[in-house]
Amino acid sequence: MGRVEVTLPRWGATMQEATVIEWLKQVGETVRRDEPICVVETDKVDAEVVSPADGVLAAQAAQRDDVVAVGGPLGAVETS
């Protein structure tokens, strides 16, 4: 088994951070690669962050209303 970190992607050249609005998946739930797992709000738009791998959501490093920098940790997916 491996662990894949979920980090906040950069969607625009000026994007520096985003605020977690909602988790669509909870720790322990099965996730598929490219499936939305949480919603974040940037200064311009709300966007879904997708799972980087098939597996189980193992951790939520950021909670609702947390501000996360681009590249910062949101969570982790445990792969088989």
Image (cartoon, rainbow, N blue to C red):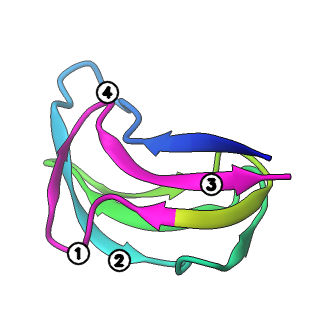
3 or 1: mark nearer the eye: 3
Residue at (80% x, 54% y) in the render? 54
- Which residue is disc 1 drawn over? 64
Quarter of the view holding residue 13:
top left
- Looking at numbered disc 2 in the image, what kind of residue is underneath it? Glu
User: Can residue 27 be found in the magenta stretch?
Assistant: no
Marks 2/3: CA–CA distance: 17 Å
- Which residue is disc 2 drawn over? 22
1 or 4: mark nearer the eye: 1
Marks 3/4: CA–CA distance: 25 Å
Q: Position of residue 73 (x, y in %)?
A: 34, 43
Marks 2/4: CA–CA distance: 21 Å
Image height of 19 relative to 9, above or below: below
- Which residue is disc 3 drawn over? 77
Mark nearer the N terminus (1 vs 2): 2
Mark nearer the N terminus (3 vs 1): 1
- Looking at numbered disc 3 in the image, what kind of residue is underneath it? Val
Mark nearer the N terminus (2 vs 3): 2
3 or 4: mark nearer the eye: 3
